[in-house]
Image (cartoon, rainbow, N blue to C red):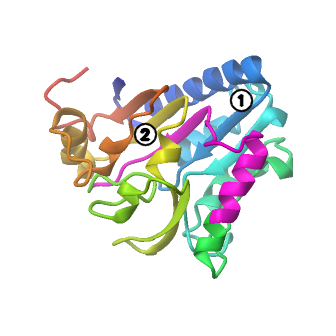
Amino acid sequence: MDVTIFSDTEQLSRSAADYIVHTAREAIAAHGQFTLALSGGSTPKKLYGLLASEPYRDQIDWSKVEIFWSDERCVSPDDPESNYRMANEVMLSKLPIPAEHIHRTPADQSDRDAASLAYTQEMKRAFGTDDVPQFDLIQLGMGPEGHTASLFPHQGSLREQQRLVMPVSVPKPPPDRLTFTPRLINAASHILFLVTGAEKDEAVAAVLEGEQQPDEYPAQIVHPSRGEVTWMLDKAAAGKLRKQK
């Protein structure tokens, strides 16, 4: 696990953009495509804007990129709460990604179990596998209570062994969401956590330096079997870490 602390969101976002460019180029060279799962929240917004602009934009062959979301709120794609809407406005609409490579989560469907299954099947088709898809990169955030994707403390989703995507109802508006499960997240080759803000400092310290309590701090459940985890923090989020890197 690699942990780096940055002075501000600007510096963190530029380093994250460099990391994504490097990972994308490596993946495309190795197997002809780059599979990326995005997160929601406000932290990655600056990063997404950077990727859509120079010098980063021209460093990735966007025709070979497949985009998914690690979780989505059960709202329409034009709702202000939609993770898809934010990424589309800030980044995707400005990049030459084929429309069929942008896999919006069907979280606005009324049957959320069916939507979860449909998203799983779409993923397997895009990856060309019947097994658990192995993302080149899953970009995650973390909330002040230690949740990541829409995996929240003390919920059954943390112990899900079969499904790759599942519906959840969480203690944060809007409550109804679809989320990647730990099984899918932990199959990834690279996981990038971006965490900013002083309100997350206690959770950051607990996750990175505390006892293993994944039921209390779901971000601790992220341990890819064959992949690597990178944490990028701003100074505020890292404020309670004993080891300041």
x%, y% of residue 236?
26, 40
Q: Say if 25 sits above or below 156 in the image.
A: above
Residue 33 numbered tag: none
Rendered residue at 72%/47% (across/down): 124
Residue 12, located in which quarter of the rendered image? top left
Q: Residues within 10 Å of mark 1 (few under 14, many from 20)?
A: few
Q: Which residues are magenta?
A: 117-144
Q: Is residue 126 left or right of residue 108?
A: right
Q: Say if 96 sits above or below 84 in the image.
A: above
Rendered residue at 77%/45% (across/down): 126
Kind of residue at disc 1: Glu
Query: Do labels 2 and 1 touch, CB within 8 Å?
Result: no
Residue 127, located in which quarter of the rendered image? top right
Q: Secondary structure at mark 1?
A: loop
Q: Which residue is mark 2?
A: 194
Q: Is residue 196 visible?
A: no
From mark 2 to mark 1, how far is it between C-alphas?
21 Å
Is residue 209 located in the magenta-colored stretch of the structure? no
Q: Which residue is mark 1?
A: 54
